[in-house]
């Protein structure tokens, strides 16, 4: 289901975490079509969930909020922040035991789903995949208990410098509305 949406809208998903009533997605949008893609994703997911559980109505907490992210300054930190969300929420003690995030696939503990783009992230830790996955696991572990990158969000929409290059694709963190 997700793969069809990512493929149709040409999105790159760098990290994700599904929680009980919301999600965190770190998405790159080469075609500036995030709103359409998220509407499609939320609609398809809600229909499938409701059909599977024989229910009707809303499934997710609400509309999403998109924050444009400076890749050079914040992408690594946000990838770590996203996969540590269930640890902060006390849903699990370790990210490797939580099945509903990108951590296990990126860390080499599970197969990488076709909708998850791990190459750029792992390349930040080296060119040999197994060593990069080991360094990624250590990087995430070092982030447990650290502060939130939300403190650096400017005007509720930008995480990075005001000189953020807007000519290329957007890197966006999608979070539930609060």
Image: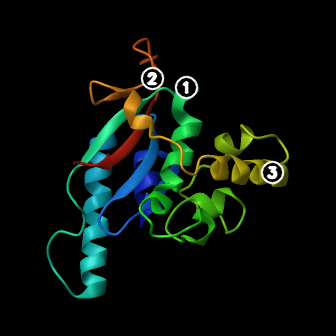
- How far across and down, in percent of the image, does residue 26 sit? 46, 45
Which element is circle 1 on? helix
Q: Label 2 neighbourhood size at 10 Å, few (<14), some (14-19), many (20+)?
A: some
Disc marking residue 129:
3
Outermost residue on the front side: it is 145
Residue at the location (54% across, 70% down)? 98
97 left or right of 13 in image: right
Q: Does residue 135 show up?
A: yes
- The chosen color scheme is rainbow
Gap in angstroms between the C-alphas marked 3 and 1: 23 Å
78 left or right of 104 in image: left
Callouts 2 and 1 close, C-beta under 8 Å: yes
Outermost residue on the top side: it is 163
Residue at the location (75% across, 40% down)? 125
Vertical placement of 73 versus 45: above or below?
above
Q: Label 3 neighbourhood size at 10 Å, few (<14), some (14-19), many (20+)?
A: some
Residue at the location (58% across, 25% down)? 72
Gap in angstroms between the C-alphas marked 2 and 3: 29 Å
Disc marking residue 73:
1
Outermost residue on the bottom side: it is 54
Outermost residue on the left side: it is 57
- How far across and down, in percent of the image, does residue 82 sit? 48, 50
Looking at the image, tell me whether mark 3 or mark 1 is earlier in sequence order.
1
Looking at the image, tell me whether mark 2 or mark 3 is earlier in sequence order.
3
Q: Does residue 32 show up?
A: no
Q: Label 1 neighbourhood size at 10 Å, few (<14), some (14-19), many (20+)?
A: few
């Amino acid at each position: 289901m997700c793969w069809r949406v990512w493929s149709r809208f040409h999105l790159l998903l760098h990290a994700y975490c599904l929680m009980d009533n919301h999600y965190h997605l770190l998405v790159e949008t080469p075609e500036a079509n995030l709103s359409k893609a998220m509407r499609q994703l939320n609609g398809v997911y809600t229909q499938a969930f409701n059909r599977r559980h024989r229910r009707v109505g809303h499934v997710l907490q609400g509309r999403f909020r998109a924050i444009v992210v400076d890749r050079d300054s914040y992408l690594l930190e946000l990838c770590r922040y996203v996969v540590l969300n269930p640890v902060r929420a006390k849903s699990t003690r370790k990210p490797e035991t939580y099945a509903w995030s990108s951590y296990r696939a990126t860390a080499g503990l599970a197969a990488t789903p076709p909708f998850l783009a791990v190459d750029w992230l792992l390349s930040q830790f080296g060119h040999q995949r197994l060593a990069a996955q080991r360094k990624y696991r250590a990087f995430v572990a070092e982030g447990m208990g650290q502060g939130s990158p939300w403190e650096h969000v400017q005007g509720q929409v930008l995480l990075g410098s005001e000189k953020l290059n807007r000519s290329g694709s957007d890197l966006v963190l999608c979070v539930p509305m609060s």
